[in-house]
Image (cartoon, rainbow, N blue to C red):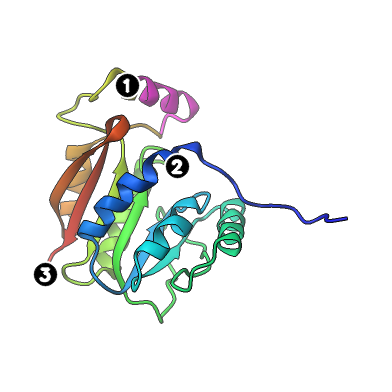
Amino acid sequence: MNTSQDLRQFAPATERNREVILEILLQILPASGTILEIASGTGEHAVYFAPYLKPRKWLPTDPNPRSRSSIAAWIAHSPSDNLYPPIDLDASTSVWTIPDTTAITAIVNINMIHISPWGACLGLMALSDRILPPGGILYLYGPFKQNGKHTSPSNAAFDNSLRAQNPNWGVRDLDDVVEAAKARNLNLINTYQMPANNLSVVFQHAE
């Protein structure tokens, strides 16, 4: 009898957004190097993106051991020779250990900054400033307020539900995120309107 346990987790939103996110990544990522994914969650994005992004390498991370187990299980189920095993990394802390063998040229962060304290966003910007080369890319995806206002009633309802779960969570104002990035030498170069009232937001590390 097979008693092995499938540790893969599933996030329904991944299948809905992975193709449109990949379209943007193919446009904006550097042509080579390692893409560091912060808060990889289930790992579904990592295993979907990596084969399409060769010769780039993809390094998934997550501070949650259960998430890292899911990522590893997904990699075992859908291996790719440019996909690293997941590492433990918490963007909200000031101590990060990145493998020395990886030349990070971009950082990707999908659906994190609204489901974490603001300190996680600030930490992400600090990490990006520290490890990205000049011209390196930081890519964010998720819902944002613009000019202090929600862009849809569904985003406003989502914001309320997040804050009910944790008052430190919530949909962030894009202007605040841009200012936090600018303080860490990251310049906004483009935003893309995405399905379901989300945005792709692209920053470039200053030369």
Is residue 94 visible to the viewer in this orientation of the structure? no
Asked if the stretch drawn in magenta spans residue 151, the answer is no
Q: Mark 2 to mark 1: distance in Å?
A: 23 Å
Q: Earlier in the sequence, mark 2 or mark 1?
A: 2
For the residue pair 101 and 5, the one nearer the viewer reads as: 5
User: Mark 3 belongs to which amino acid?
Assistant: Glu
Quadrant where the N terminus is found in the figure: bottom right
Vertical position of residue 58 compared to residue 184: above or below: below
For the residue pair 89 and 74, the one nearer the viewer reads as: 74
Res 74 quadrant in image: bottom right
Res 138 quadrant in image: bottom left
User: Residue at the spot x=29%, y=59% of the render?
Assistant: 126
**Residue 81 place in picture, x, y as percent:** 48, 74
Question: Residue 15, labelled with which disc?
Answer: 2
Quadrant where the C terminus is found in the figure: bottom left
User: Mark 1 belongs to which amino acid?
Assistant: Ala
User: Residue at the spot x=59%, y=46% of the render?
Assistant: 9
Residue topped by disc 3: 207
Tell me the SS state at disc 2: helix
Q: Main secondary structure of the magenta part?
A: helix
Left or right: 51 in relation to 187: right
Residue topped by disc 1: 156
**Residue 105 place in picture, x, y as percent:** 27, 70
Range of magenta residues: 156-168
